[in-house]
Image (tube, rainbow, N blue to C red):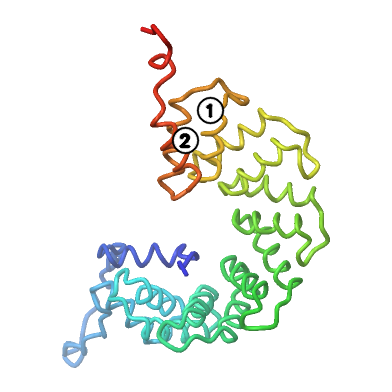
Amino acid sequence: MVFRFMGPLLALGLALACGEEPPPPAAQPAPATPASPAAEAPAPPATQAPADPTLRLLAEADAGSAGSQATVALAYATGLGLPHDDALALRYARLAAAQGEPDAQFLLGALLQEGRGTAADPTAALQSYLSAAKQGNVDAQIAAAELYLRGEGAPQDLKEAAHWQLEAAARGNPDAQFQSGLLFMRGIGVLKDDAAGIRYFRDAARGGNAHAAFVLGVFYENGESGLRADMGEALRWYQIAAESGEAGAQFVLGERYEQGRGVTASRDEALRWYRLAAQQGHEEAQRKLERLERQPEPDAAAPGAR
């Protein structure tokens, strides 16, 4: 699993890797006061925090700071700022999670689910995800939904899966919005509702989810799920999806340009989109690309053409 929550914690980890730190505040001189001879004896030196930011972070984590423990756990888990060490990542994630730190609870769930630093334990992973999900951690909500959907860590529970996916979607996560659209389209854990599915697909596509944009393109081309057939609107969504790297949309655009369906036929554009899809392993695009590249260009094929 890629650790997707990596917001402020990843920024801290990257800062550690680069050796960056904010400048310390300037010390203010104490006002001079007459001193007695006894007072002139030097005071014992105050305990100094480590100057190195990594050592300081580790010291804070060992002193019990949940935020520092979570950052250290992430650094060990990813190898950013500290050597990669799953056992230490697990140790610090447990410490921070026990203090209720939601990012650490999500990270702990991921480590437990994947068996990193310990034997895989999907039941414990789900419980850790749920602890974070209840505090609004979107990635934990998505992870919990996936486990409930697959029946890992608990008996399959489609309603719980839908509940947590919709919670994440409500917080604006495009991937959760796309998955929520699928749930409504298929009636999984919720009543089947094509209109609701379309709304979630639109939200997801506007948020940058290329799969949702591709699905909208298919629906508009075929006039499915309550949408009126509209090739212009279909091509608009295909273009958005293809430019975002969706191989299926790139293949479809290649076909449309090769056939001149809804667009002016263009061998060059067809080749371009087939090639992009083929580079991602789209097998049909690879076959059509090879066929089209073997064909002579129309002008060269025409008798007496110049």
Q: Secondary structure at mark 2?
A: helix
What is the quadrant of the C terminus in the image? top left
Q: Secondary structure at mark 1?
A: helix
Taking depth in this image into account, of 305 and 19 the one nearest to the observer is 305
- Bin the neighbour count of mark 2 within 10 Å (Cα to Cα): few under 14, some 14-19, many 20 and up: many
Label 2 sits on what residue type?
A: Trp
Taking depth in this image into account, of 62 and 29 the one nearest to the observer is 62
From mark 2 to mark 1, how far is it between C-alphas? 9 Å
Q: Residue at x 50, y 83 (%)?
A: 112
Query: Disc 2 designates what residue?
Result: 273
Q: Residue at x 43, y 49 (%)?
A: 280
Estimate the x, y position of residue 228 in percent, counting from the top left: 78, 34
Q: Residue at x 43, y 81 (%)?
A: 65
Estimate the x, y position of residue 194 in percent, counting from the top left: 79, 50
Estimate the x, y position of residue 257 in percent, counting from the top left: 53, 27
The label on residue 257 is 1
The label on residue 93 is none
Q: Is residue 286 left or right of residue 199?
A: left
Label 1 sits on what residue type?
A: Tyr
Q: Residue at x 70, y 62 (%)?
A: 166
Figure check: 86 above or below 239: below
- Bin the neighbour count of mark 1 within 10 Å (Cα to Cα): few under 14, some 14-19, many 20 and up: many
Figure check: 189 above or below 295: below
Q: Quadrant of residue 219?
A: top right
Q: Is residue 140 left or right of residue 282?
A: right
Give the mark nearest the N terminus, 2 or 1. Answer: 1
